[in-house]
Image (cartoon, rainbow, N blue to C red):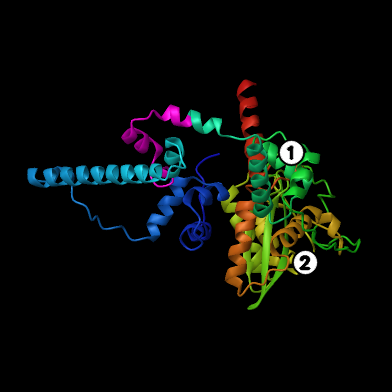
């Protein structure tokens, strides 16, 4: 694949993740599947260049360099004084060994600095620390991991996914042990209410159901699926359109609007096209909703050489993968949350889609890996196989 040409809309959304929503450049670049260098360049183009405030060290006079060196020496001596004062003060209490005092002091100063001042090898201190580990430390650590995973997943992981995530983190934990740890940690999956879909049947006059529920796709950027959902806020309804790659179940395009119109689904598809830049032969599947059946959207598909496919009327099972994503989004993140306005809802949902669902959430259709990780693994394997053959 050659150099990708990103749209201005895509660049603006990427920069907003960093400047307005507070994500790091590394996390934002990983979520959007772009290079950090490119993202930093886009950010730099939007920000004013910082005015240098420090002078060139080579331009300092001998007196200025001497003053600078003396200030550094004074700071080092003051730090040594503070460490020794703290060390002897704790020892005088008579209840702690010198190792325990170092352990207390490392909360404020680096271990290497404390050990150097006290004349103790770091290896001696770390050896003592390892001996203090109790048999229950591993279980306590596992309990902490279980609670962290429970919160990170939005209280959505049961014992099966909990055990899979713990194994990914290097802990040999089966499903039954995971269930016991969850019970001991007093965490339980919060189940969403079931929703029953109707089973319609009429095909669309615009495009047949070419996908025909063949959701298992062997390569990325061969079959995409899209749909629209709505989220209530105190400011009014917020509509979300997504585009999902059925190969990895990764959300590759998304857009928000105050109304479920054609511009919403067009924007979501354009974001996906700008990010992924698929080759010829892509199929796009959707329901028969008016935004997808509109002339503007169908014309965009024709311009990009994308083959349309539409579910049968009222049959949500024909687009079950995207429907299941919306079920996860609402059951795991939105649930009973009350958003003050659309901006708050948009920021929270973007966090779920790009940083949790794509990058962290284990997906059974992706070999129990996050969609982005599964996709990268499969692409890397295919690249190595092509080199061999």
Whether residue 253 is visible, yes or no, is no
Disc 2: CA contacts within 10 A as few (<14), some (14-19) or many (>=20): some
Image position of 64 (left or right of 110): left
Main SS of the magenta part reads: helix
Residue 313's place in the image compared with 362, above or below, is below
- In the visual, does 178 lie left or right of 41? right
Q: Secondary structure at mark 1?
A: loop
Q: Nearer the viewer, residue 63 or 339?
A: 63
Please check the rendered image and state whether residue 116 is part of the magenta-colored stretch, yes or no.
yes
Q: Nearer the viewer, residue 243 or 309?
A: 243
Mark 1 lies on residue: 367
Q: Which residue is mark 2?
A: 289
**Quadrant location, the N terminus:** top right
| Mark identifier at residue 256 | none
- For label 2, the SS is loop
The percent coordinates of residue 230 (x first, y second) are 71, 69
Query: Which stretch appears magenta?
Result: 105-126
Quadrant of the rendered structure where residue 200 is? bottom right
303 sits left or right of 173 in the view? left
* Residue 196 within the segment the image draws in magenta: no
Residue 186 seen from this side = yes
């Amino acid at each position: 694949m050659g150099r990708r040409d990103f749209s201005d809309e895509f660049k603006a959304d990427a920069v907003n993740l960093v400047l307005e929503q507070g994500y790091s450049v590394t996390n934002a670049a990983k979520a959007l599947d772009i290079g950090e260098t490119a993202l930093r360049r886009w950010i730099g183009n939007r920000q004013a260049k910082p005015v240098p405030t420090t002078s060139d060290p080579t331009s300092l006079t001998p007196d200025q360099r001497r003053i600078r060196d003396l200030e550094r020496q004074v700071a080092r001596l003051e730090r040594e004084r503070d460490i020794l004062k703290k060390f002897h003060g704790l020892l005088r209490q008579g209840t702690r060994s010198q190792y325990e005092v170092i352990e207390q002091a490392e909360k404020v100063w680096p271990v290497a600095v404390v050990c150097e001042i006290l004349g103790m090898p770091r290896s001696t201190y770390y050896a003592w620390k390892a001996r203090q580990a109790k048999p229950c430390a591993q279980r306590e650590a596992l309990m902490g991991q279980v609670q962290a995973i429970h919160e990170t997943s939005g209280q959505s992981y049961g014992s099966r996914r909990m055990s899979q995530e713990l194994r990914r983190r290097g802990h040999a934990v089966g499903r039954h042990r995971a269930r016991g740890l969850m019970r001991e940690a007093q965490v339980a999956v919060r189940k969403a209410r079931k929703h029953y879909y109707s089973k319609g049947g009429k095909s669309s006059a615009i495009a047949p159901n070419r996908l025909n529920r063949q959701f298992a796709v062997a390569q990325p950027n061969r079959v995409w699926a899209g749909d629209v959902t709505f989220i209530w806020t105190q400011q009014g309804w917020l509509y979300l359109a997504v585009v999902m790659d059925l190969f990895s179940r990764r959300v590759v395009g998304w857009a928000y609007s105050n109304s479920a119109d054609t511009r919403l689904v067009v924007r979501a598809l354009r974001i996906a096209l700008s990010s992924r830049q698929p080759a010829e032969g892509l199929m796009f599947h959707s329901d028969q909703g008016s935004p997808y059946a509109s002339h503007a959207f169908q014309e965009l598909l024709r311009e990009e050489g994308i083959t349309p496919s539409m579910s049968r009327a009222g049959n949500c099972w024909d687009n079950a993968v995207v429907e299941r994503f919306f079920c996860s989004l609402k059951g795991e993140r939105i649930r009973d949350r009350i958003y003050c306005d659309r901006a708050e809802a948009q920021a929270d949902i973007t966090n779920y889609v790009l940083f949790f669902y794509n990058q962290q959430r284990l997906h059974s259709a992706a070999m129990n890996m996050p969609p982005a990780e599964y996709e990268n693994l499969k692409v890397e394997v295919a690249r190595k196989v092509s080199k061999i053959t």
